[in-house]
Image (tube, coloured by chain):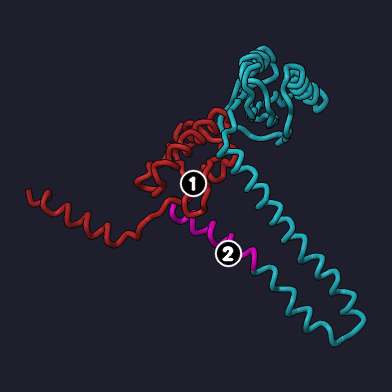
Amino acid sequence: MAFHRQRPNQRQQNSQLRKKRTCRFCDNKEFYVDYKNEKKLQRFVSEQGRIIPKRITGTCAKHQRMLVIAIKRARHMALLPFVADAVK
Amino acid sequence: MSRTNIYETTFIVNVSLDDAQIGVVTEKVKDFIVKNGGAIRELVQWGRKRFAYPIQNKNNGFYVVIEFSAPTDFIAKLERHYFLEENILRYLTIVLDKKALKARTSAAALLAEQAAAEAAPPAKTEAAVPVKVETPAAPATVAAAAPAPTVESKPVAAKEEDDEDDAT
């Protein structure tokens, strides 16, 4: 029980420490995510090749939707891995 | 007459063919687009590129990107053409909507601006060099003027570094 009581406090502290993330696409005023720019997409993919959730990257919902499509297109064209070599 | 759209198609050609044969494959696709009522807007060859994962036991491919406008019913024909062409390993055709086209034109404008900015400083220094030779008094002003353009490009690079920090 004590454990449960402590967690919200910790979370609060963390959120206070962490600086507010903003959507990178909104900041740069980009309204389209191109699948051909694999270097840019790589930032939104984990080392294993998984798409990083927007709660971590701070991307807004609208851009995350575009991003997800772009990443999947890039994977189809073998620009990004489905699963990284290290995991295989 | 059905509606026309602007499309972008990317395909990967088998890299074990020689350049002439790859040229033939892309030429075929080009002809196919033109013959079926399409118009090519742009053709970009990325050249040989390593895959992120093997496709048909191959690790490299030759990428070609074509932007074209065509009637909507043409895409099915094009994809069939790709399917029947053995030397095309992968293909992807997407519609370019208004947003994408707008992004493209603005990106092109940005690139042109950057190219103009990059082209400008060398022109300045070239102009400055003969002056330096002729009159020894000039170098001070030249040195003051030359570093200025490099400062312009710096904020962009710094911004990108910031982005990388956030991603981890």
Q: Does residue B102 appear in this view?
A: yes
In percent of width and height, residue A51 lies at 43, 38
Left or right, residue B88 beside residue B126: left
Quarter of the view holding residue A40: top right
Which amino acid type is marked by label 2?
Answer: Pro
User: In this picture, which residue range is highlighted in magenta?
Assistant: B152-168
Q: Residues within 10 Å of mark 2 (few under 14, many from 20)?
A: few
Direction left: furthest residue:
A1
- At x 68%, y 51%, the residue is B111
Tag shown at residue B155: 2
In percent of width and height, residue B76 lies at 61, 15
Q: Which residue is mark 1?
A: A43
Q: Nearer the viewer, residue B37 or B23?
A: B37
- Find numbered disc 1 in the image and state the secondary structure of the residue it sits on: loop
Magenta span dominant secondary structure: helix
- Find numbered disc 2 in the image and state the secondary structure of the residue it sits on: helix
- At x 43%, y 54%, the residue is B166
Give the chain ID for the red colour: A
Find the distance from the CA under tag 2 to the CA under tag 1. Answer: 20 Å
The answer for which chain carries disc 1 is A
Q: Colour of chain B?
A: cyan
Direction bottom: furthest residue:
B137
Left or right, residue B99 beside residue A50: right
Left or right, residue A36 beside residue B33: left
